[in-house]
Amino acid sequence: MTPESRAQSERLLRAWALPTGWRYFSAVNNTVVGLWYTAVTLLFFLFGGVLALLMRLQLSQPANDLLSADRYNQVFTLHGSVMMFLFAIPIFESVSIMFLPQMIGARELPFPRLSAFGFWAFVIGGTFLCGSIFFDAAPQGGWFMYPPLTSKYQPGIGADIWLLGFSFVEVAAIAAAVELIVGVLKCRPPGMRLNLVPLYAWYVLVAAFMVLFAFPPLIAGTILLELERAFGWPFFDPAGGGDPLLWQHLFWIFGHPEVYIIFLPSVALVAMIVPTFARRPIVGYSWVVLSAIGTGFLSFGLWVHHMFTTGLPGITLAIFSSASMAVAIPTGVQLFCFLATALAGTVTRSVPMLYVIGGLSTFVIGGLTGVMVAMAPFNFQAHDTFFVVAHLHTVLIGGAVFPLLAGLYYYFPLVNGKHLSPALGRVSFWLVFAGFNLTFMPMHALGMLGMPRRVFTYQAGTGLETLNFVATVGAFILAAGFAVVTWDVLRPKGRQPLAARNPWNAGTLEWLQEMPGQPWGVRSIPEIDSRYPLWDQPDIIRDHDEGRFYLPDAEEGRREMLITSTVDATPLQCMRIPGPTYLTLVAAICVGGIFIFPTYKMYWLMAVSAALALAVIVVWLWTGTAEIPEKPDKDVGLGLTLPLYASGQESVGWWAMFITMTGVFTAFVSLVFGYFFYWSLRDDFPPVPAPGPGWQSPVAAAALVGTAWLLTGLARRWNSMDRPRRYYLALLAALVTASLGMAALVAGPWGTGLNPSRGVYAATVWVLVLWTVLHVAIGVVMLGYCIARRVAGRMTARHDIDIRNVVLYWHFTGVTTLMTVAVIAGFPLAG
Amino acid sequence: VVWFAVIALALYAARWERPRWSVAHGYRLIIGGGVVLPMVVLAALLAYGLPAIGRLSPPPQEDAVQVAVAGEQWWWRVSYSTPAGAVELANELRLPLGQRTDITLTSDNVIHAFWVPSLAGKVDLVPGRRTRISLEPSRTGTFGGVCAEYCGTAHALMGFRVVVMPAEAFAEWLAAQARAASEPATTDAMRGRTLFAKNGCPACHVIRGADPGGRIGPDLTHVGGRSLLAGVLPNRSDTMVQWLSAPHRVKPGARMPPFGMLPAADLRALAAYVSGLQ
């Protein structure tokens, strides 16, 4: 190593160093945040596993009284919810936060503080949820939370904990999804065109987009259910004109894609592992990518198969039955691509491959039983029985847990430079594999014998005793397997030698990492021209280590990364990203207050939290984003000079805003869906003549908000033309018109005396109005922020990230307002 | 079969000593196994399965036996309409052999699902909606039924029985059910009737011919003739005592208040009266 290279790496290390001492937890580096995130996720997994053991113990004997009925119902509700929301989805995001940048040769994810915020939100929300069981206050409505059971019939705070707690966790999940999407699209190394992207990144992209479109309908449903619980707005109560099935639609529009959100990223691990051990590139790269995307799309069209027994018309059943089967095709394609890769290469035996094969064989069974339950006639019999319990665990454990364990054994050396023990790995595999089959195979039979799901006990003499006992024994063998894995991870490895660099001889970029890794991610950002650069680009490790690629240095002591174009990955910008901070933790605590206080009906504390959260987030944005660099551009190495500042469509912030708002808009569309769902269901929706909100106020509101929208656009233009006075005037005028617009929006239903607790029509109108008002209000804060930024000199005619992003926000808010007005004012007129 | 083929291939792939496949072979496998195979299999399955959907919910029939089943927390309210008036019972459904019975399913509380595994698939009872199921049993016997949609605390104990009987026996049974309650046969039972009224039981229970009563709990006019007590216990007078004294022990969350504070003799008398209502 040359002295120059050494000096470079010292400067780089200083810029990227982890904070030490009491500041340790202010770190935002993706490697540590990802590691914490994964560790906490695995803790929740073990917690969920303990709950499962409790259930198996209870069911090992007929008429057992180990757990009371209510306690059992809490346990199964929490088991399902924890495994889904606190393990299966976050594990994909946390693992991606940890490894995705390395896989695409990036230093970091584009918004390191956002990942840290998401992590803290996840910890707070998850602890709040899991802790509830120790106070006998856990939710007991099932992880699907069907009203009216969860609205009128469970008066305690359990259901509120579920609704608000998981909404909070979902916000964190969406934040991570936005970050991962932007990461894959904009932070790839030069030369990594879309057709060279590692398969893992493709899968993450698909899964993150699915999170973006699947979670908002659930959040919308959650808002409706919580409004019903807290204030008696009868969205799901037939007595007030509501309908319980709306919840089921919104829940399963989320719930079915969710299965694939869990499954796809785990398959992504398989797609990384199989080529490595087959010693050859994947066969059918584009087939895999296309079928991953196809699975993603199809999965949004299957949700009704969870509702086959609700008395839907036959034609609906037939359509969704066929669509549910069609998803077998892209899944099959992926599977056969992996098989073909293995066949066309030479397979090396190893623990990861053992888990891959175990997972594959299990998943195929799950897929076949899946085709069975997709058949509507069979579904009528199997639905809500232990057959479905067995099916879903086969799919999720085979499709997700086995690949994750494979991934754990495969990627562990990247975490601390040490291997996990292959001997313990084999022991754990056989325990897990045997335990799994012993637990879940009997459950297929139990379901066929007529044992329904979610039962805290069953009667003696019904022929269910033996199989249940066997399943319990199996569950403990399975648990022993996980105990071995846990020990292997936690056992002290002080004397164990470091793993060799790229120990599996893999071809993908994450294995560029030194053993153990450095906080900077990559020493220098490589130029890529292959899907398997470590196999195809002979000197890449040496060039990387000696800093011969891009950004080998941190001359200004700042954290910097490359932003490239979406399709061809040509370098666009050298972006500076902020370092350690506790602001993210404080923000997560304050935002958490918004969700946690209403559980206990402490609405004024909630308001205080909201105000604090707003303040902290403004400080965070003010100090950490859209910084004006001291020079316009910078030499990033290899003779390339890139700008340090980019705004509008070239900036990652704009992309993040666009993607986030797409998700927010999806939630709004779900609420509008609710309006039309009631319209299609009820003759008196909207009532004739409509009791409100009239057309005058809403139309006035549309005009006012529309004016504010237009003025914001003009302000952006005047800012670019460097006409500050016009800019300020336009923004002030927009502030005033938007505020008046909010008043007019509320005046509609208020003035006509629509009482939301009286009937579903009024409640639906109010929820649309309040949603819109909330977004206009946030838009107003943003307008004020833009005024302040320019006054403070943190925004100029050229450095205009803030106003451009705000304009983008206003595009979405403007459309939202117009749609709301068209629906609440226009539709009763048309009807 | 599909599973064995795939696993065999996977194990083969994992073996050391074998020729490497060419990439072209690989693509043929992907297209053959991933696209063509599932398409053929699924098309065949759909062709077989889709027509069956229509058969599951045939249009209502005029001459079918009409039964209304309502889901309660956590029992089944079953009512037949007969020329002699409505007959209501709980947790028990009787069907005539070889004859269509159309069942309408409703719930005014939470969502339940009606399921008799041996007779048919399940159908949900959704508040605010009316669902239907048609049964046409082809053999006599007693079949167990359960609630298949999680409905709260005692969901697991919301059992019922379906008894399929020859048509004439069914008609006789229904006629008997339509009659008012029988008079208590023993002195103990006579005392039980007094206790029944004194302890406020009619607030929730109807005994046709004896007490007008409320509709919160099951109709007890012929409760002694049912096969199950509370949907879980065998129906005898000793289990009746057990139920009366502590219903929540048998069925956690049950709305019925416990009467364990009554003297044991009173409980026995009550049980004798109620169980005697055959």
Image (tube, coloured by chain):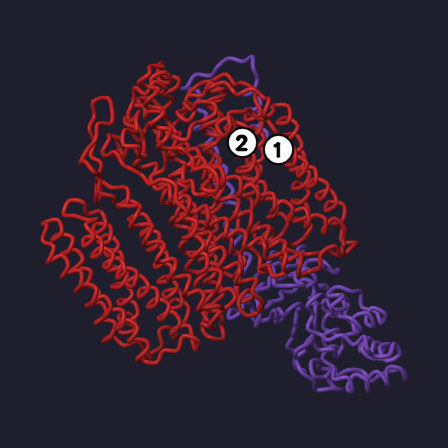
In this view of the protein, which residue sits in the foreground, A568 or A300? A568
Compared to residue A92, the image places residue A139 above or below, namely below
To which residue does mark 1 refer?
A485
* Residue situated in front as seen by the camera: A714 or A222: A714
At horizontal 62% and vertical 35% (from top left) the residue drawn is A486
Query: Can residue A200 be seen in this snapshot?
Result: yes
Q: Are marks 1 and 2 on the same chain?
A: yes
Which amino acid, mark 2? Answer: Leu
For disc 1, the chain is: A
Query: How much space separates mark 1 and mark 2, taking CA atoms?
Result: 9 Å
Q: Position of residue A768 (x, y in %)?
A: 34, 66
Q: Residues within 10 Å of mark 1 (few under 14, many from 20)?
A: many
Look at 28% across and 76% down and name the residue there: A747
Tell me if I can see residue B1 in this picture.
Answer: no
Question: Which quadrant of the figure contains the N terminus of chain A?
Answer: top left
Q: Earlier in the sequence, mark 1 or mark 2?
A: 2
Image chain in red: A
Frontmost residue, B273 versus A521: A521
Q: List the residue tagged with mark 2.
A: A408
Chain B shown in which color? purple
User: Callout 2: helix, strand or loop?
Assistant: helix
Residues tagged 1 and 2 counted as in contact (Cβ below 8 A): yes
Above or below, comparing residue A354 to residue A665 in the picture: above
SS class of the residue under badge 1? helix
Q: Chain of mark 2?
A: A
